Image (cartoon, rainbow, N blue to C red):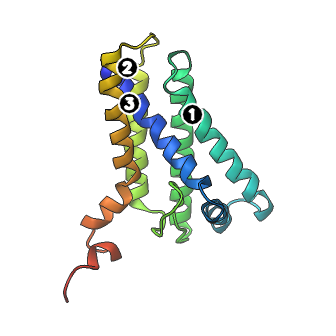
């Protein structure tokens, strides 16, 4: 179970790294993320920058905490908290009829919606699994690291691409209709 535990925590950590880096990798990405927060109309515009900074900072703290055995449970709690918060924001935006582009991983033209909730639900399940399996032991063996870390990173890359992959199979998506003949 140590393998599954470390794969889950590595995957979650990498998801939060990809997410935070995607938001701050360029001035344009940072501006787009702040603007998406403002477009949600859930907080006063003057708080959009502070909120954006807080989100990125919390994602980084969670990403750092998850792979460290002594901090992994705090990292898992932080992961669950952020994912619940993100999901609540998505649901509220959908109910309000706001078509706000998701800047979860920095750049996407896809409005927040069902695929984002499905992705977050999967990540919440992984977080719960990580909490159930968490083993606070160290040091890790070379074999454990060589298997678990690449598997976790590969999982994170797939998760970061989930919305785009989902749109390939969603008949109502403009992405899935691009290559079709009428």
> Does residue 42 appear left or right of residue 103 in this picture?
right
Classify mark 2: helix, strand or loop: helix
Q: Residue at x 50, y 54 (%)?
A: 105
Residue tagged 3: 8
Q: Residue at x 37, y 20 (%)?
A: 133
The numbered mark at residue 53 is: none
Classify mark 3: helix, strand or loop: helix
- From the top left corner, tell me how far across and down residue 173 is, in percent: 33, 73
Q: How many callouts does the rendering have? A: 3
The numbered mark at residue 62 is: 1
Q: Whole-Å distance between the Cαs marked 2 and 3?
A: 9 Å
CA neighbours of label 2 inside 10 A, class few (<14), some (14 to 19), many (20+): some
Q: Verify CB contact (< 8 Å) between mark 3 and mark 1.
A: no
The answer to whether residue 43 of the structure is visible from this angle is yes
- From the top left corner, tell me how far across and down residue 127 is, in percent: 43, 32
Compare marks 2 and 3 and give the one earlier in the sequence. Answer: 3
Q: Whole-Å distance between the Cαs marked 1 and 2?
A: 18 Å
- From the top left corner, tell me how far across and down residue 162 is, in percent: 35, 54
Q: Residue at x 54, y 58 (%)?
A: 106
């Amino acid at each position: 179970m140590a393998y599954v535990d470390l794969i889950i925590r590595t995957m979650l950590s990498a998801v939060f790294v990809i997410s935070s880096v995607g938001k701050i990798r360029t001035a344009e990405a940072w501006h787009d993320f702040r603007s998406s927060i403002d477009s949600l109309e859930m907080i006063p515009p003057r708080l959009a920058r502070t909120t954006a900074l807080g989100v990125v900072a919390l994602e980084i703290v969670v990403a750092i905490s998850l792979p460290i055995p002594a901090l992994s449970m705090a990292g898992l709690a932080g992961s669950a908290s952020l994912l619940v918060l993100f999901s609540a924001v998505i649901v509220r935006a959908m109910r309000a009829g706001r078509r706000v582009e998701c800047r979860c991983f920095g750049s996407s033209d896809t409005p927040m919606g069902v695929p984002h909730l499905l992705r977050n639900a999967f990540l919440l399940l992984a977080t719960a699994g990580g909490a159930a399996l968490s083993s606070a032991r160290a040091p890790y063996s070379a074999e454990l690291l060589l298997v678990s870390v690449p598997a976790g990173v590969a999982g994170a890359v797939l998760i970061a691409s989930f919305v785009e992959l989902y749109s390939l199979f969603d008949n109502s998506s403009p992405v899935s209709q691009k290559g079709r003949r009428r």
